[in-house]
Image (cartoon, rainbow, N blue to C red):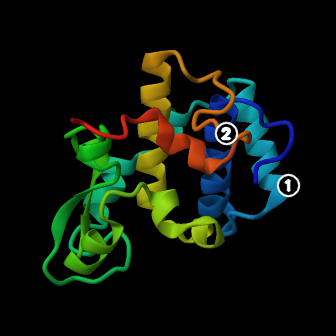
Amino acid sequence: MPPKNVKTVRELVYWEYAKLISGSAVGDRKNYGFVMHTFKKLKDNQLHPSAILKENKRLVEESGKCAYCGCCDGLQWEHIIPKSRGGPETIDNMVQACPKCNQSKSDKDPFEWYGEERKYEIPRLVLGKYLKLVYDVCEKNGALDSLDMNQDGKLDVFDLGSVFNRSKS
């Protein structure tokens, strides 16, 4: 759960970015002091999400292995946000995945697939691209200051996937 001072989708994305940056900088996504310091910089516009993540460069550097498990066999392109849920058909929404991970993930977003208990295991490449997609879509749709996207009475990482269309009928 994000801290109580995280009240909007924008702040939730910043909080998750701060944890991601902490993982890269100090090797621990749970380093509260570093996360809070980075979160405040993001919130105060001293850092900007798209300026701090270079996910497509990382995609090239990590090519040849599954973004989820590291397997090198039978790789296929996988949509982080499934097309069936409104995920864009762009490189920003794609990683390489082995058939087992691709099939297991199915039409879930990363937080749904990993679940609450494994959310810190979402690979950096996947999470960085996911957060960038969520931020960009929310910015475009004027939803960054929304309070509870999935209307379950709380703001948490499962709200982030709600910014995408659930079905394309």
**Which of the two residues, 130 or 105, is positioned nearer the viewer here?**
105
**Which of the two residues, 42 or 101, is positioned nearer the viewer here?**
101
The tag on residue 61 is: none
Q: Residue at x 42, y 28 (%)?
A: 137
The tag on residue 12 is: 2
Instruction: Tell me which numbered mark, 2 or 1, is placed earlier along the sequence.
Output: 2
Query: Which x, y percent locates residue 105?
Result: 35, 67
The tag on residue 33 is: 1
Q: Residues within 10 Å of mark 1 (few under 14, many from 20)?
A: few
Q: Residue at x 79, y 35 (%)?
A: 40
**Which of the two residues, 135 or 161, is positioned nearer the viewer here?**
161
Look at the picture and state if 9 lies above or below 29.
above
Query: Which x, y percent locates residue 146?
Result: 64, 24
Helix, strand or loop at disc 2? helix
Query: Which x, y percent locates residue 46?
Result: 69, 27
**Which of the two residues, 161 or 96, is positioned nearer the viewer here?**
161
Name the outermost residue toward the top: 142
Q: Residue at x 73, y 39 (%)?
A: 153
Q: Quadrant of residue 136?
A: top left
Helix, strand or loop at disc 1? helix
Look at the picture and state if 131 lies above or below 19.
above
Q: Residues within 10 Å of mark 2 (few under 14, many from 20)?
A: many
Q: Amino acid at mark 2?
A: Leu
Q: Quadrant of the N terminus?
A: bottom right
- Closer to the camera: disc 2 or disc 1? 2
Q: Residue at x 28, y 83 (%)?
A: 71
Q: Amino acid at mark 1?
A: Gly
